[in-house]
Amino acid sequence: MPAATRSVRAAGLLLTAGLVSAVGLAAATAAQASGPSNGSPARPLPAATATANFSLCSGGNYPSYVVFENRHMATRIAMPGDCVQLSLTGQSREKITIYGIRPNGQEFKISTDTFDDAVGEHIRTLRTPDDNDWTTF
């Protein structure tokens, strides 16, 4: 599906890909202006809460978000050094896609994974837009 027509639901708000890009542009520009350029977060990342079964922490020097394909929703954008936490139920195993946002607002795909709401998952994006990666914690 073209990015221009893709819509996702994030924390109760309907976002079109263009809006995500516009928000990402402003956020990524601010993050680049204030954060380190070596891929390290500006401050230690918060720990996942006990009630959240999904966390996304943006551990690199770029904003990131995750799309839950079956739910047609996405997390809010996690700025560098911040985490987004959700409590999700009802879908069992589903495909998720992890995205980052470059300083110019361009979104890029980091990877795909399978999320199981019965088990939970905590994801941390890493490094820089041109040398991106992710891990679980």
Image (cartoon, rainbow, N blue to C red):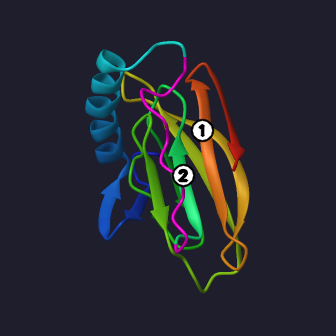
Which structural element holds mark 2? Answer: strand
Q: Is residue 84 magenta?
A: no
The percent position of residue 67, horizontal first and vertical second, equals: 53, 57
Front residue of 122 and 1: 122
Q: Is residue 132 above or below residue 9?
A: above
By secondary structure, the bulk of the magenta-drawn segment is best described as: loop
Q: Identify the residue at image location x=58%, y=83%.
A: 89
Q: Which residues are magenta?
A: 39-51
The percent position of residue 63, horizontal first and vertical second, equals: 44, 36
Kind of residue at disc 1: Thr
Kindly check if marks 2 and 1 are in contact, taking CB atoms under 8 A apart as contact. yes
Q: Is residue 14 left or right of residue 134?
A: left
Front residue of 72 and 123: 123
Which structural element holds mark 1? Answer: strand
Give the residue at mark 1: 125
Q: Is residue 49 magenta?
A: yes
- The 10 Å Cα crowd at callout 1, few under 14, some 14 to 19, many 20 or more, is many
| Count of numbered circles in the view | 2
Q: Is residue 82 above or below residue 33?
A: below
Work out which residue is located at the far top of the displayed protein and give it. Answer: 37
Q: Is residue 19 above or below residue 9?
A: above
Work out which residue is located at the far bottom of the displayed protein and give it. Answer: 90
For marks 2 and 1, the one nearer the N-term is 2
